[in-house]
Structure formats: structure tokens, C-alpha cells
Amino acid sequence: MRAPRPRATALALLSLALSLLAGTVAGLPATPAAHASTTDASTAHASVTHTSAAQASAATIVTYDFESGTQGWEPRGSGVSVATTPDAAHGGARSLLTTGRTDTWHGAAVTPPFEKGVAYEVSAWARAAAGQESSTVALTVQRTPAGGEAVYERVAAATVTDSAWVRLTGTYTYTADSTLSLYAESSVAAVAFHLDDIVVTADTDPARSGLTSDFETGTTEGWTSRGGAVLTAEAGSAHDGAYGLGVTDRQASWDGPSRTVLGKLAKGSKYDLSVWVRSATAQSVSLSIERRSGETPSYDRVAGPRDLAAGEWTRLAGTYLLAHDADFLSVYVESAEGTAPFAVDDFRLAYIEPKPVQTDIPSLKDVVPFTIGAAFERAATLGEHAKLITKHYESVTPGNSLKWDATEPAEGQFTFAEGDHLVDWATGNGLRVRGHTLVWHSQTPAWVFEGATKEILLRRMENHIRAVMGRYKGRIDTWDVVNEVVDENRPDGLRRSPWFEIAGLDYIRTAFRVAREVDPDATLVINDYNTEFPRKRQALYDLVAKLRAEGVPIDAVGHQLHVNVEQPPASYIEDTIEKFAGLGVEQQVTELDVSVYTDFVSSYETVPAEVLALQGHRYREIFDVFRRQAEHLSSVTIWGVADDATWLSTFPIARLNPPLPFDDELQAKPAYWGIVDASRLPPLVRSLNVPAGTVRVDGKRDGEWDLLPGAPVPRVGGLSATWQARVASTGPSGGLYVLAEVVDATVSKDDSVTFTVDGTPYRVRRGGTHAHGFKAHTKPTATGYRVEALLPLPAGTGTTADARVVVDDATGGETSWAGRLTFVPAVRTALAPRGAPVVDGVAEAAWNRAPEITTGTRVQGTSGATARVRAVWNAGVLYVLARVTDPVLSEESPDAWSQDSVEIFVDPQNNKTRGYDDDDGQYRVSFTGRRTVGGTFDAFAVRDNLTAAAVRTSGGYLVEAAIRLPTVTLAKDTLLGFDVQVNDATGAARTAAATWNDPTGRGYVDTSRWGVLRLVP
């Protein structure tokens, strides 16, 4: 049914309640006989009047026209029925008819979302049903003060007949915390009557006044249970002040405290919401909005899920923009699972005054040589968000509204309302539309696969594609036909989704065939993430080449590009675009965003300005790639309109993560200027860890440099470089070794690299000439040249130095890197000979050839368990033996990392990144042999790689582990990023931990400080 029509700024929810307060009318009791009570005017805390004085500058709160449903009105009294009918209407085609009454107070009622202290004016039209006698119809509020008895307060009344519509008007105000019910009644018990066109206005705007609940009144302050939970205002539940709200006896995870906010939120307006929550036991909780239009509920997450530490208050906070008409709105707190009690306090809802979109800055679409677009949802079609889209973008992609769960939740039952709204809005504003997505393993209803043979599954898919694509034929010109079908960790490179398990590769073939038949003019895309990484790149390339060779109509490859401020290197993105250009397919960037985090666990309360600057420079280097590759790119889509609505606010965890060019207030960020005008970016000061080491300076690339990847120097035209450094093993007095690997195909003796350290420049020309006072050599390489040098450091240099590296192409190009160097201990290395022990907890002779390393780097505590470790390899498997000294062992903690255990860290490609790549793994084995694996996306790519055994020994325990490494070819001189950590538990807590190399204690999220394992025969 249709929700109440909101005003333009959309406060659509308060109207019903006010149509009821006008005073006593002859023939109709002031209160129902069955509920009779009297209230002294001095204690009623309500203002009741029969007048209808016009209110200056009144805001329309809500209009109920009943054109598509009862809009929240329900029967009042046994046997009463309320329904919409076309038999009579004041305006439009329908009205609300109340029948089955047997008492004067029987009628139609709604729970009004009135706010205390606000003066409302209510008007309504009433009429007796055909053949009914005349009577007095009244609108009345039943108000029950907190801790008090119900009082009945008339809003409006008039005598009605079946011959004409009569207008009821009145005003209403109340000033004490109360629960309210607004109802229509008649002075004649059995009369049936119609209501229509009920309008509520207010002298203030409740949707801008906010709402707080601190429970200092000692009451629940309007909060009610969503199920059977008991809510109690109590001192023991206070976050601040004397009272909070205890929530006990919950019947389900969703059962908890709820507060109506109907009328407090306006359609198209944005709000800050926050609440403090505490639980005696650890659990995960969320803050959400339930909204309904008619009988259809929807649930919108505002904040969370957030993990609560036992006994500690945690703040849930987020923003919410109401994008839909609604006749029911409530805010509520729930848990992810279970029914454990919790307490809430200090709830706050505040209106956010929108900032106007900046009109004095360049439009993104005017500064790039390809179509630029954004993903969007309904909220972005309103207010300033809509203005931002139409100013900056040429195309839009519905983020969720065209996916299978949104369009065909049950077989043959299609729901296009949301998709229609977005496509209509986009085409009405002259925007192109990308369709996302027809076939995907995620957000596909379970029924699609239930009982499906290959034939049934392909038929269901064909029916779906024909229905969805067919509806938008000629209006959506590009479709992501299949999404995320590649798994580079499989031998054949294909994801083992239910689609593949049932239908094999034919599901992809069929999807593209049907899509071409439905809309021959549409661009058909195969879309995937991580295509910038070499292994995923190759797997997708091979698949596309194979299918196109078969005649499968794949027109374009979509590169999602969900990246972060550091990884992957921009050169990876460029390599991918250049590789697919050779296939002759169109290419699109489909879901670009830049996370401010390099891992899956860190979180900022406020993102530092320097991180936002880094993000801006990251957008710059990525769009530099796009511009260079413009002939191979038809479009770039940014995955969101502004930072106030991004999937990264909840994935992979709930945290502040602003990944887009425009901030929460729709204002341009450094990320925007990185696309538009890099000269407006804040200065970028990078950081680089410089380990101790000794290098032979001869231009031949000493093996020391292979332990770490080079830091990229941004590409400018055809000029780029990487560089790294080592501080002399004897300390800064021994100087700074530097290496630059330059890509520069145009050869000139005046090409050069200048290293500036703490203000002193050292220039080395391509031919090897340089000033006196330092040592340097150069060598030509296949793509340019290499520079090695040993630079003096000023006397008194401590643990840091400022550095700048300028790479100059004498033909006109220049690129540079600037930042702070931090001197750290040498990267430890160990040798792993070839061997194939049996993993059974027995240290056989195969281990004897391996040198032993020890966990001597303390990351927690000053003493505790240690391990002696050996490693060998064979046929794609790394074997690790750890002998742990630890006389007291415990697995009491529910957390695996707080149990006595050994953790083995492996980076197969030795990329030394500040986050995990998909094939990086944290492999943990407890003293009892319990295995846990950590990595990206729930360790999906590595979780099956570990085999292990553990046995107790007289002074501790022994762990044997075998780790499959299918993403690299193990061979002599292969370098693996590697570390080992031993965890020491006392009771239920970890009290000590020690590693082999990494001193940071962050090895579980960051591979950059791990040691290196070199494979030998």
C-alpha cells in the first residue's frame, strides 16, 4: 500500500495523531464509557482547543489519503473492521471505511508519533456510510502519562451525514512524557463512517528538532520491547547520570528496545544516530531502523555490528538518510545472535543540516577522457545527493536493486519497484545506466539452486535474464552479465559456486547467449575483483580468451578495483589493462573505491588528515593510469556517491572508512583533487622502513635487495622507478646504501637519479658519473638502468632521516618520492633445505639438515615460552618444526591466540605488504593440535592449506606442520616471507609472545616486517 505523502522535505509520519483533539461535542462523550476518566486541566499537561486558527509558516507533517491502503490505521474495539474502499472518496478514489462498531468509542486508531511541546493542527474529512444515520464523528487522543492513568483529549468533532463530506479541524499539544493513541469515534454506536484526506501540520518542524533519551526520568521514555523483552529504567544500567535502560528476558536476537521515530525523520533528510550499549557478557550488537510502507517491513542498518567487551560501554553511531515513504518508523537495538541481556543509555538522534553541493569546482565528467559514473541507491536521488550526481557523473549503477534477490526473490515473482525508480530517475536526468548484476554466487536466493539439475538451473537463469534485461531493454545499455566467476586458487581458475557445481562452465556460456538474444545492442560484461593481481589477471584472461574463441559474446571485461591507499601498486592496474587490450575487448572499471586501511582489523575514530592526503595521491596515480590507458577504457564507475553511503562502512568489519572522492557532507576531499587537479593536493610525506644491511656497490644488484620489494616512484609518462635503502650494519656512521631501478626507454647520458638525504643531494647520471664524496655504480637493464650507491649520513644521525628521490629523464620527464626513513634491524634470513618429513609429531632425521632459528624477539612480556624452529620444503609444500619450551600449558581462553600455540606466517611471494594478500597465511597450531588459519576474507584462499600434529614433551610441546603453497613454484633460491610466533598462556590470558623477526606484534595483519626464508637444495 502507498505510504503517507510526505512534504517536499519529507516529514511524512506524524499526521494521524493530530486529527483528534478538538473538545467535547453534544451527543458524544468526552471519553469512552468503557474507559471513562476525568482529568483536571491543571494536571493534564495537554492543550485542547476547538479552534482552527491558521498557523503561520506551518510545516505539513503528513497527509493520509488512503489511496493505496490503511496507512497504519487499525481497528479500535472488538469486531471493528477498517479498510479502504472506492465507495466514497473526498479526494482521489478511495477513503477509509470503519464498520462493525458496537460502542461509541469503537472506531479506527493509529499510534501517533507526536512530539511533546509541539503544536499541531489537524484537519480531516468525514462522512457517514451510505444509508447510515447522522452522528457526531470525533478525533480523540488517548494519552497515558508515564506512571499515570489514561486521559482522553478531544482534537476535533463535527456532525456528519451520508449526503456530504464534512471537515473536522482542531489543534493539539501535550507536554509530559506519554504514550498516545489517536482514534476516530462516533456518538452513535453502530454507525459506519468514512475518513479521508487527513492532514497534520505543525508550527515547528519535528523532523529537525532531534530526539534524546537519557532515562533520567526513571522511565523508559517511550522505548518499548520489539518482542517479549522486559525494559526497565534502572540505576545499574547508567552510562552517564543516574539511570539507563536495562533490557532483559529477550526472546530472540532481534528482541530488544525500540523507539518510534515516525515524524522525527523526513524523507530526503540525513540524521546522526548514536546510543551507548553495555553487556555483562561479550556479544555483538547493532543499531537499526525498521520502516514499513503498508504491511511491508524493511530493515536498514545504521551502525554495527559492533563487538561488546564484557562489562564495557560501547558507542554505536552512524548516519541515516530516509529515502522512502513510510507509515511506520522505529529505531532499535538488537544482537547478532542469542538472547543475552544488555543495557542502553544516552540515545541521540540529530538532524544534519545539508551543505550545498559545491558548484564552483570542476565536474568530474569534464576532466576525464572516458565516461565516469557512480553506484547509487534511492537515497542518492534526493536533495543534494541528486545534485552531486548530476553535476559530476554521466552514468549510474544501481548498487543492489537489480541483483537477483531484489528482482526475483521467489521463482517467477518479480519485484521491479526499486529498479524502476532508479532507472526512471537516471534516464529522466539524462544519465546512462549500467545494470549490475544478472548472475552472481552472492545475493542469489536459495530457491534458485534448490532441487536444481543443470537443465532446471539454466532454465531458471534464462527466465530471470529475459525478464530483467527485457524490462529495461533500450534503457540500460551495459550489463554485468556474470560477476566474480574466477578463483585463481583453483587449478582451472574457476570459482566453485553453486552455479559451477551444478552447470559447469555452461552457466557462463548460457548467460551471455541469452543476454545477447534479449538485447543485441547492450554491452555484455564479465566482471570480477582483484583482476589487477597477476594470478587473478591471468586466470580471467585465460577464461575470456577461451570463451570468446568459442563465440561466447563477451563484449567487455569489468575490473572492480576495490583497492586501498597502498596496495596494489598502480603498475599492477596498468599491466592488467594493457594485457586485456591484446584480447580486443572493451574494458571498464566498474566498482572503484580506495579504503583508508591496509588490513581488515584496524579502525580510526577519526581518519587522520595525512591518511586522507595519501588517499588523494592514490587517486591521482590511479587516474594517471586511466588517462594513459584511455584508449582501452570506455568507463570508470566509482562505487558510491559520497562517503556517507559506502559498503566499506560495514565490510569487512564495522568501522569508519571513507573511500570516495566526496566526504560525508558531499564536499570535495583530497581524493577528488587527486582526480581533478593534483596541484591542490596536500604535500605527501611517505614513510619507509630501512633495515640494516651490507651491500656490494657495483651496479649488479646485490642479493640483499631481494629481501624487500622496492618502494614505487610514481609513473610519469614512460618514466617510473622503484627504490629502497639499507643503513650500514655498523650503524648510520657507516652510511646509507641505496638502489634505484629505473624504467626509461629513452637513453640519454644526462638521465639521472638524485638522492637527497637530510637536505644533502647526491646525483648519479645514467652513465655512472657523479660528484666526489660517495660511491656509486650504474648498469643498464632491459627496461632502463639501475643505480647503486653508498651515501654518507651526517654525523649524529639517529634512527630517522628525511629523503627525496628524483628520477629525471633528460628528454623532459621527472618523477619523485619524498618521505621519512626509519632505521630498523636487519631482515633476518634462514635457509630451508629440501626434505619431506612425515607430519606425525615425531622429529625424524629429515629435519636434521635444516638450520635452527629461535623466537628471540619479544612482542609481549619480558619472558615466557620460546621455540626452536626448522623449515624444509618439497613439491609445493613448506614443512615447519617447532620445539617449544613452556612447562605450563593452557587452552582455557576461547580465543585461539590466547592459548599456548605456535603461529607460522607465510607470504609465498614475499611482497612485504602492510596487509595480507589472498595467499598470505597465519597458520596456528596449539599444543593439543588445534588448528586455526588467518588470512583475507576469512582466509578463504589458504584455510585448507594446513596439516599439523602436536605432541607434549617433558618441557613443553612439539609442533610439526605442512603448509601447501599452490600459488608459487617452490625451487632453489625461492624467497618466502616467513615468521614464527610462540604464544604463552597463563590460565585464560595470553601473557607473553615472541617472534623470530617481526618486532611489531602485528604479524597477524601486516607482512612487512616478517623475515625471509630462502629455499636451498
Image: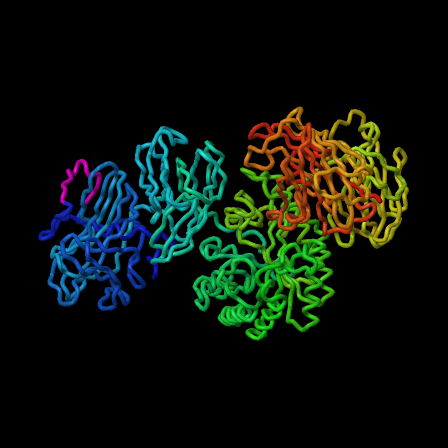
Q: In what quadrant of the picture does the N terminus appear?
A: bottom left
Q: Looking at the picture, does residue 978 appear above or below residue 7? A: above
Front position in the image: 735 or 151: 151
Left or right position of 629 against 118: right
Give me the residue at 18% from left, 42% from top.
151
> Which quadrant of the figure has residue 367?
bottom right
Is residue 755 something one can see in this rendering?
Answer: no
How far across and down, in percent of the image, does residue 225 sit? Answer: 34, 43
Give me the residue at 51% from left, 46% from top.
664
How far across and down, in percent of the image, does residue 5 sit? Answer: 34, 58
Give me the residue at 57% from left, 39% from top.
603
Left or right position of 795 against 659: right
Q: In what quadrant of the picture does the C terminus appear?
A: top right
How far across and down, in percent of the image, does residue 761 sit? Answer: 81, 36
Residue, far left: 27
Number of marks in the rendered image: 0
Left or right position of 592 against 163: right
Q: Looking at the picture, does residue 745 appear above or below residue 857? A: below
How far across and down, in percent of the image, does residue 499 sit? Answer: 58, 63
Front position in the image: 348 or 362: 348
Question: Does residue 829 show up magenta in the picture?
Answer: no
Question: Does residue 44 show up magenta in the picture?
Answer: yes
State which region is magenta: 36-48
Majority secondary structure of the magenta segment?
loop
Left or right position of 331 against 25: right
